Amino acid sequence: MSQWFFCSEAGGTKVTNDSRPGGKYVVEMPHDGEPVVIHGVYLEIEPPKKLVFTWNSTRGVKDSKV
């Protein structure tokens, strides 16, 4: 995930990931000098067919289901 959510600013991206149903993820990356945090919960995982998770961010996106 840290390579997927890359960042060109110094400091890079920090990722915590528990990839199982009910597991949580957090992606922290700098953007224009401010940290952006994306987080959610994995709801369904059926490799390689299905991945359902929530998506929340400090940039205004709240409780989306992807």
Image (spheres, helix red, strand yellow):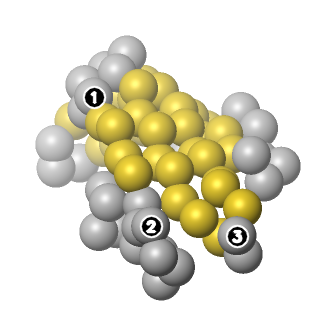
Instruction: Please give the name of the residue rendered at 74% of the width and 46% of the height, measured from the top-left corner.
Output: 58
Residue 66 in the image, given as x and y percentages of width and height:
55, 45
In the image as oriented, which residue stretches furthest toward the top?
A: 22
Instruction: Please give the name of the residue rendered at 37% of the width and 16% of the height, measured from the top-left corner.
Output: 22
- Residue 33 is tagged as 3
Element assignment for label 2: loop
In the image as oriented, which residue stretches furthest toward the left?
A: 47
Q: Earlier in the sequence, mark 1 or mark 3?
A: 1
Tag 1: Cα neighbours inside 10 Å, few (<14), some, or many (≥20)?
few
Quarter of image, res 44: top left
- Residue 51 is tagged as none
Tag 3: Cα neighbours inside 10 Å, few (<14), some, or many (≥20)?
few
Instruction: Please give the name of the residue rendered at 27% of the width and 28% of the height, measured from the top-left corner.
Output: 18
Tag 2: Cα neighbours inside 10 Å, few (<14), some, or many (≥20)?
few
Element assignment for label 1: loop
Q: Label 2 amino acid?
A: Gly
Instruction: Say which residue label 2 marks.
Output: 11
Element assignment for label 3: loop
Count of numbered labels shown in the rendering: 3
In the drawing, does residue 27 fall left or right of residue 2? right
User: Which is in the foreground here, disc 1 or disc 3?
Assistant: 3
Q: Label 1 amino acid?
A: Asp
Residue 7 in the image, given as x and y percentages of width and height:
47, 75
Instruction: Say which residue label 1 marks.
Output: 18
